[in-house]
Every structure is written in C-alpha cells, then in structure tokens.
Amino acid sequence: MSDIQKKSDVILIGAGVMSATLGSILKELAPDWDIKVFEKLDKAGEESSNEWNNAGTGHAALCELNYTKEKADGSIDTTKAVKVNEQFQVSRQFWSYLVKSNLIENPQDFIMPIPHMSLVQGEENVAFLQKRFEALSNIPLFQDMEYSDDPEKLKKWIPLIMEDRTQDQPIAATKIDSGTDVNFGALTRKLFDHLEETDVEVNYKHSVKDIKRTSDGSWEVKVHDLDNDKLEFHTAKFIFIGGGGGSLPLLQKTGIPESKNIGGFPVSGLFMVCNNPEIVEKHHGKVYGKAKVGAPPMSVPHLDTRFIDNKKSLLFGPYAGFSPKFLKTGSNFDLFGSVKPSNVLTMLSAGAKELALTKYLIQQVLSSKEQRMAELREFIPNAKSEDWDIVVAGQRVQVIKDTEAGGKGTLQFGTEVVSAQDGSIAALLGASPGASTAVQVMLEVLERCFPQHTKEWEPKIKEMVPSYGVSLAENPEMFRKIHTETEETLGLTVNGPISGAKSKSS
Ligand SMILES: Cc1cc2nc3c(=O)[nH]c(=O)nc-3n(C[C@H](O)[C@H](O)[C@H](O)COP(=O)(O)OP(=O)(O)OC[C@H]3O[C@@H](n4cnc5c(N)ncnc54)[C@H](O)[C@@H]3O)c2cc1C
C-alpha cells in the first residue's frame, strides 16, 4: 500500500547525533521550517552515537597522539590538533547555548569533566611526547597541559596503571584537566526530546529504502513503516542523510555524480568493561597510548573513566576488527551490496592496497579474551580476567575514495560531507573525530547547502557559537572567555577556570 504524504522543507534520515544536531541548529535558524525525521530503530541514538557504542571522548586533541604527527625535520605538526580542538570548542558553545536557552537541561547527564592524558613508554616515544608537549603548551588552547616523566608523580596521576609496573624503560605522560567524557547517546536523546517538543515529526521504526529526484527538483524518499508493514512516500526540498554507517547505500541510491567512486570499509570494535567497583575507583582519566606499528588510527588503545547511567565505569579499547556490516544492527551483505559499477575499481584498488589492514583486523576479530587481556595488561599490569567483560562497540564505515595524493581506492580516516552541487541533499560519511565535531560539521553542511541564507543566519549562528568564523588559537582572550563561560554553563568547573599557567615537572 502506498501513501503520498505532504511535502516538508527538510527530511533528516537517521536519529543519531548528526541529525539531532542539524535539526536543533535548523530549528533555531529557521523555526518555521517543517522538519521530518525517519529512523529505522525504535529510539534515538541507538547506533554509533549510543554511549556503549563509542568511547565518549570529547575529542579536543588533548590526549590523542595521532593528531600530532612528527614531521621529517623532527618537529611536531600541531595543525590537526588545533583544528580538532577548535571544532570541539564549537560544540561546547552550541551545547551551552541550548542549556542557557533552557532548550535542554542537566548538562551533567551528557558531559563530565575528566583529565585527558597521553601515556608512552620507551626512549623514542618519551622524546616524542616531550616535544609534543613543548609544541602544544605554547598554544593557548593547550596551555594548561602538564608533562611528567617522574614515576612518583605518575603514581599520583595514574595509580592503577603504575601499580605493580616493572620500570625497565622510561615512561612519561601529559595531563590536562579540562578534558571531557561525553555521553553522546544521552545528548542525542535530549536533542530529539527537544525537537519533538518543537513539533518536529520523528518517525521511529521507519526505514528509508530509496531516494529519488522529483520533476520539480525536490527529493522523494520511500519509507517502510515497519510496525504497519506499509510503504510511504515523502518529499522534501532538502534531505540530510545522517544514517551513520547506513549513509553510503542511501547516498548511492540518489545517483548524484558526487556519490560515484566512493566506497565504504567497515571496521567493527570491542571494548573491555571493568565490573569491579574497587578498580573503577582507582582510575580517574582518559589515558590514550600510541597505536601499535601497522595498526589503524581507530585502534589506539585507551583506558577511560566513563560516566554512563549516573555510574562511573572503566572501559578499555577499542579493539578494532572486521565485519561486513555497515551498522551494528546491519546485515552481512552490506559491504557486498555497496559495490556498484561506479565504485568497483575504487573498491578493488582499496582491497589490494589494504590487504595488511584487512589481515590485521581479521586477526583482531579472532583474538581470544586472554590475548585481549594481554593488551590491557600493557596499561594495567595486574589486570585480572574475571574483572573485565567484553562489550561490542559500534561499527565505523571508513570512506574509500580516489584522491590525488593516495591514488585510486584510498582509505580515509576522517569525517566527510558529500553533497549535491545544488545543495539539495547532503550525506555524512566516515567516523573520526566523529560526534565531537558534530556542530562544526553540521554548520558546514548548512554553509554548503544553504548559501542563499548564510548572511541572514550569521547573527543567530554567532549568538549560538560566538567563535563562528574566528580562529580561537589566534584569539587567546576570546578562547579564555568562551572556555570559562562554557565550563560554567556545562558544569565542568571542578578545577576552576583555566589559569593560563604552563607547568612541567620531571
Ligand atoms: C568504536 C567507536 C568509538 C568512537 N569513539 C568516539 C569518541 O570517543 N568520540 C567521538 O566524538 N566520536 C566517536 N566515535 C564516532 C561517533 O560515534 C560517530 O561519529 C557518531 O556517533 C555518528 O553519528 P551519526 O548520527 O552519523 O550516526 P549514528 O549514531 O550511527 O546514527 C545513524 C542512525 O541512522 C539510522 N539509519 C541508518 N540507515 C537508515 C535507514 N535506511 N533508514 C532509517 N534510519 C536509518 C540508524 O539506525 C541510526 O540510528 C566512535 C565510533 C565508534 C564506532
């Protein structure tokens, strides 16, 4: 049975953090626009955005070593770290705006302060960390970072990691107290509650099956109402494909030229979760290590204090692996179904290039719990198997495309927006840095797809995100003001406002 519905201004596909963010921004900029959401599951934030499916790191490049590469001359390239940090400041500002405007409440349900640390061992890695610290702590965004290679000091910072550790090689860490743990699932649910209160029609258990251009240049989506086993057709002037791993197959259905020559490489993940409260209490921080040689950036190991369901817990991982599914709730045919005449060469080239990575990921999938415990013991030397359980994380679908630098079938590790030339449809692909940059990325979607409204919307965007269009790294005064204000509004002031002091002890 088919049912032609009223045309709306905007359709958002998927109820993850990206659609939640885009919908919430649009409601402020164009309150009269009619917005519909279609989500195939029965709740919002159940796929990658769910708190148990991602690591919950408010990525601000405070601890992730892969954002600061060492250049050929031995100096540290801080460009990406500055970019990621500035993007997170944009998210903080928008969330603060929503709280101050009473559009969402109780920010502690979705964001908590937690020190972010980087930890390395071995002479070469310690030298790298020290150089990284020197380079970053000269930039206002990172100025409260501390460095130490003194085991006694590290015992205070990371007692659980230092307990029973054989100190046969140099060890060092950096620590910055202004890091955060973000419950992106709780945030997504809050944003969807807010959207529903503002008359956005959110349709759960509605799976989008097809997307087609209509004769007047709008888009028609074919939707399966899963409860009533009924097909519906809805049209809109603008569509955002926020299907997470499910975005690529939907983008391919649009047939837009920009959707050609793109493929997806799915990477699964696991975390270990500690179920012993005594151990959980001994750790307070997100501690990122270095990825092993040959391991992809998404398998950088970290030991994280997490705040989920008002409870403190400890997660270690992620252990990356291979699965052909594009969503955790997806199908084993997702990968093969995404191979089309327009991307088969790109996919085959990537397959040939990434044999080592595929082999690595398959080996990871086949690891036993004891092998995983061995990796955990590099962080917690005395970790006991009975204290840790395995939880399955979300799926990431990394973008494969042809690039000038990498050639045909190059694997990308970032987040990518693909949009039609006329701005009538956009899709979000990729995973990292992911949810933390949702606000910046969705503002970019609006700039790309609604250039005719940019001037009219700018004052409101600046009210929501005062640093819009400004480099905070180059405007330390503005950074301090914004950082302090958002810290207060979001309840992140446990350590008081940032002081501007730089410290080092060794
Ligand atoms: C293991 C792991 C760790 C991560 N760690 C971090 C981290 O520490 N910090 C960080 O910032 N980011 C992290 N990320 C990335 C982050 O989780 C994602 O970037 C973000 O959640 C993506 O949000 P989304 O809205 O695009 O997708 P999702 O949250 O996956 O939502 C997509 C939604 O679309 C729905 N959908 C799909 N297809 C259809 C369809 N055809 N019809 C209707 N609905 C559909 C899905 O059911 C789902 O609800 C991590 C990701 C993973 C997997």
Image: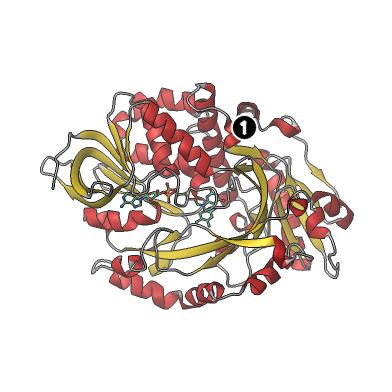
Residue 131, compared with residue 96, is above or below; it is below
> What x and y, as percent, mark residue 26?
36, 31
> Dot 1 corresponds to which residue?
479
Q: Which of 390 and 404 is in front in this view?
A: 390
> What x and y, as percent, mark residue 4?
14, 40
Residue at (66, 33) in percent of width and height: 492
- Furthest toward the right, the residue is 152
Q: Which secondary structure lies at badge 1? A: helix
Residue 436, compared with residue 356, is above or below; it is above
Residue 93, compared with residue 416, is above or below; it is above
Res 376 quadrant in image: bottom right
Q: Nearer the viewer, residue 192 or 387?
A: 387
Q: Which of 306 and 420 is in front in this view?
A: 306
Horizontal side of 490 relative to 230 (left or right) equals: right
Q: Which of 260 and 207 is in front in this view?
A: 207
What is the three-letter code of the residue carrying label 1?
Answer: Phe
Residue at (53, 72) in percent of width and height: 365
